[in-house]
Image (spheres, rainbow, N blue to C red):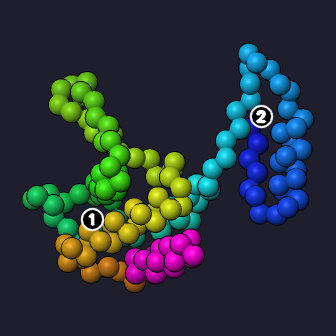
Amino acid sequence: TKKVFYLRTEQIRSHAIEQIRNLPLDQSKPYEIELSPPKRTLSQNRKMWPLLHDLAQQVVWYGQKYDEDDWKDLITALVAKTKKEEQRTAPGIGGGVVMFGQRTSKMRVSEMIDVIEAIYWFGSEQGVKFSEESSAVMRWAQQHNRSSAA
């Protein structure tokens, strides 16, 4: 059974350590213990969609209008490229090439902020007039970036 501990208090830390101490040791089937920063929440994911909606409504890219899902793929590919991450591709089953997008559900909070900031940057470059909801998201991202940098 998978157990996840969110280290917020000393009591939670102690409980996690105790759980690890009680695990059986087995060379052939060892337990995997992973420590990582938190993944983005559903609330953080919802913050991205108003920005993508503004792009979908206002931007024509190389003669095409794209929906929010397409813009998510384009923006996550941009973020991956700026971080020098490899863009995965494969030959399409029916021909052509398929480019794999990044799954925002697997992203950490800081990665989602990068995506939100990239949407805002790109939209600003394209003259997008962001909605009030989108502007509130940007204020949230900027505030979160300041608090995590401190």
Please tell me in which quadrant of the rendered image residue 53 appears.
Answer: bottom left
State the residue position of label 1. Answer: 56
Query: In the rendered structure, which disc, 2 or 1, sits on the residue that comes first in sequence?
Result: 2
Going by the numbered disc 1, the residue's amino acid type is Ala
User: Going by the image, does 40 lie left or right of 18?
Assistant: left
- Residue 91: percent from left, percent from top: 24, 27
Is the stretch drawn in magenta largely helix, strand or loop? Answer: helix
Residue sitting at x 18%, y 26% = 95
Where disc 1 sits, the SS reads: helix
Q: Is residue 146 above or below residue 24?
A: below
Please tell me the numbered disc located at residue 1: 2
User: Going by the image, does 68 lie left or right of 150?
Assistant: left
- Residue 50: percent from left, percent from top: 40, 70
The answer to if 85 sits in the magenta stretch is no
Q: CA separation, marks 2 and 1?
A: 42 Å
Characterize the local packing of mark 2: few (<14), some (14-19) or many (20 or more) Cα atoms within 10 angstroms.
few
